[in-house]
């Protein structure tokens, strides 16, 4: 397992958002966290990426205990995430958005490189080249000079994927990469998510739409009330009548 979530709980005061949660993410797969609203998916993401520290339990990445490490530390170890609200720099170009995410050395991001006049033009050229390559991967190479603000929503989602690639992380956590997309845009974005695996990445994502999950995910982790009810192949998990009743009875906005 690339990632192991081991008996993790997260309490917010009296509220138990995640309760004794155990699951694994295998290297080279797309794994989807699913579950009704309030099941704890976002909290699990925040725990894995260091934005929250579990109340109890351990998280292991590549066999190392990473429980409680900061998001920055985890990023350097190869765990990166996107956010539902994408967090793009809308008044910068598409290329600049990707270049800014470059991780040259631990603790050094592109901001410090831009601010430091000593940055060699060779280093900048290398970052630019990598950024363009990632833009090409997501199909946005010809939009490199556009302001991010001028992109469609689907293109902005693709840009957020190009940005996460720039981190060189091996485990990519994608927060609802398909949400808000019309069917045509889905046809553009979903194959890109799948191709991340061909690039050697491992993907953990949150997705509400069951049809998409079936198409996209190798594995499902089914969360309900902060607990893992099942982990397995989409077809197997969804053929379980009890689980589908919980899922569709849970007021999910697909
Ligand atoms: N920072 C917080 N403080 C208090 N309660 C929180 C906090 N974050 C999440 N919760 C609660 O934890 C529970 C799980 O929430 P979470 O957002 O993780 O679920 P989710 O599965 O991502 O839901 P959705 O599908 O609606 O995004 C909810 O009851 C939520 O209100």
Image (cartoon, rainbow, N blue to C red):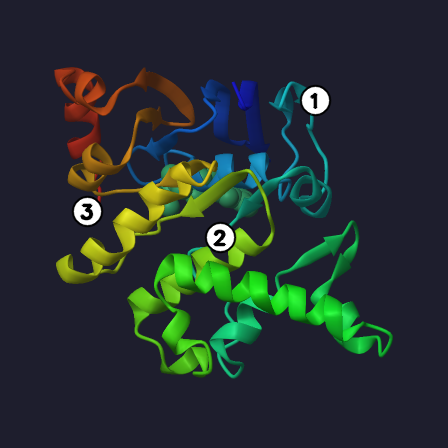
Residue labelled with disc 1: 65
Q: Is mark 2 within 8 Å of ligand 1?
A: no
Residue labelled with disc 3: 254
Q: Nearer the viewer, residue 138 or 15?
A: 138
Where disc 3 sits, the SS reads: loop
How far across and down, in percent of the image, does residue 60 sit? Answer: 63, 22
Where disc 2 sits, the SS reads: loop
Q: Is 113 drawn above or below residue 223 in the view shown?
A: below
Where disc 1 sits, the SS reads: strand
Whether tag 3 and tag 1 are in contact, CB under 8 A, the answer is no
Marks 2 and 3 sit apart, C-alpha to C-alpha, by: 20 Å
Q: Which mark is residue 131?
A: none
How far across and down, in percent of the image, does residue 174 sit? Answer: 43, 46
Which residue lies at the image location 40% right of the left edge and 43% below the top edge? Answer: 196
Residue labelled with disc 2: 82
Q: Residues within 10 Å of mark 2 (few under 14, many from 20)?
A: some
Number of marks in the image? 3
Which residue lies at the image location 50% right of the left edge and 34% below the top edge? Answer: 44
Q: Which quarter of the frame holds ligand 1?
A: top left
How far across and down, in percent of the image, does residue 171 sit? Answer: 53, 37
Q: Residue furthest front?
A: 122
Q: Is residue 13 left or right of residue 243?
A: right
Q: Residues within 10 Å of mark 1 (few under 14, many from 20)?
A: few
Where residue 120 sits, quadrant-wise, is: bottom right
| Front tag of 2 and 3 | 2
Which residue lies at the image location 55% right of the left edge and 24% below the top edge? Answer: 9
């Amino acid at each position: 397992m690339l990632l192991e979530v081991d008996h993790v709980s997260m309490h917010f005061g009296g509220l138990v958002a995640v309760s004794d949660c155990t699951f694994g993410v295998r290297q080279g797969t797309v794994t989807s966290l699913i579950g009704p609203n309030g099941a704890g998916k976002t909290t699990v993401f925040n725990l894995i990426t260091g934005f929250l520290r579990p109340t109890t339990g351990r998280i292991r990445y590549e066999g190392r205990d990473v429980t409680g490490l900061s998001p920055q530390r985890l990023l350097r170890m190869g765990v990166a995430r996107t956010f539902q609200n994408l967090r793009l720099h809308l008044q910068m170009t598409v290329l600049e958005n990707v270049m800014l995410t470059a991780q040259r050395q631990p603790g050094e991001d592109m901001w410090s490189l831009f601010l430091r006049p000593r940055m060699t033009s060779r280093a900048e050229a290398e970052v630019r080249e990598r950024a363009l390559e990632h833009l090409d991967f997501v199909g946005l190479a010809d939009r490199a000079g556009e302001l991010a603000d001028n992109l469609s929503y689907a293109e902005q989602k693709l840009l957020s994927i190009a940005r996460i690639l720039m981190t060189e992380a091996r485990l990519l956590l994608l927060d609802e990469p398909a949400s808000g997309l019309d069917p045509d845009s889905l046809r553009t974005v979903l194959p890109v998510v799948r191709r991340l695996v061909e690039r050697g990445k491992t993907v953990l994502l949150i997705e509400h739409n069951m049809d998409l999950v079936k198409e996209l995910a190798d594995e499902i982790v089914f969360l309900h009330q902060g607990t893992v009810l099942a982990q397995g192949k989409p077809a197997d998990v969804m053929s379980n009548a009890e689980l589908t009743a919980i899922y569709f009875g849970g007021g999910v906005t697909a």
